[in-house]
Image (cartoon, helix red, strand yellow):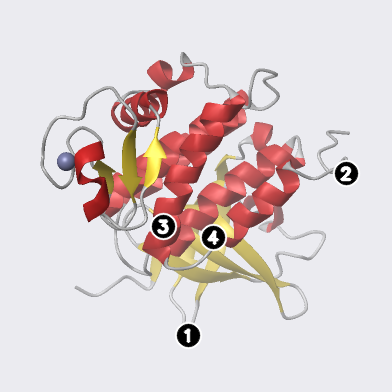
Amino acid sequence: MSTPKLYKTEAIVLKGSDLGEADRLLTLITPRLGKLKAVARGARKPKSKLGGHVETLTHSLMMVAEGHTLDVVSQSQTLHSFIGLRQDLEQLSLGLYAADLVNCFTEEHQENQAIFHLLVETLDWLSDVAGEKAWPAGETVLRHFELHLLEHLGYQPQLHQCIHCQQELAPVVNFFSPSAGGTVCPHCREQAAWVKPVSVNALKCLRLFQSDSRQACCRVKVGPELSLELKNHLQGYLRYLLEKDIKSATWLDRLQHSEYPLLSTR
Ligand SMILES: [Zn+2]
């Protein structure tokens, strides 16, 4: 099937970098065309019509022309700017982390509509919870995102039965094994490499985030300790799958544990 010379697509800008004197090189995720790279010519010029519509983490409707080496964005209209994300650095970093995971786990030109829509939903949700004073609701959003991203990639972790003996897991401390792709019961612990204990509450939360809607997840109050345990399990699994560190996750850690007031919202 031949691709049209000029095509219209929704896209989220996963990242952008300066190119030449006034252009931006964009990495986009689209519903039908998967991930792709395109140039926004002149986007850095002050009077550019594209400028505000091709910023990182913007969901836009674009007209794109096929190029010899790179496609070129000819028009772009913002559908969602996720304004809440842009109110402070921490919130923005949560959104950038989600976009970075999508970038790391997807290949160019491979359609995955579910991942596109998951990212739109996640950025929208992060934008909504911006500024909430309870234990960062953004962390819950990210865990929900990670679990659903894993599902859409075909790496959904097994959280109900022991991955070795297939027995239903008892409500006791079990073990999470990234290499086995899920949870292992205490009896099978020795058979799995690199396991970490998973508490009863952490397993309940992981199952809830994996199966339930945004509304159900919002009702759960996750304290700092449990939040850290959930993050360690999921990011350990993601790291195992990627076989490398997720750069933006390390950055997020540094930002959140910084002694310096980097997170000023002024
Ligand atoms: Zn077992």
Q: Quarter of the image holding residue 108?
A: bottom left
Tag nearer the camera, 3 or 4: 4
Q: Residue at x 35, y 52 (%)?
A: 31
Tell me the number on the disc at residue 69: 1
Is 152 above or below relative to 247?
A: above
Query: Ligand 1 is found in which quarter of the picture?
Result: top left
Q: Residues within 10 Å of mark 2 (few under 14, many from 20)?
A: few
| Mark 2, residue position | 260
Q: Earlier in the sequence, mark 3 or mark 2?
A: 3
Secondary structure category for the residue under label 3? strand
Q: Looking at the image, which is closer to me, 44 or 179?
A: 179
Q: Amino acid at mark 3?
A: Lys
Secondary structure category for the residue under label 4? loop
Q: Do tag 3 and tag 4 residues touch (Cβ < 8 Å)?
A: no
Q: Position of residue 45 (x, y in %)?
A: 79, 65
Image-based side of 151 in relation to 216, left or right: left
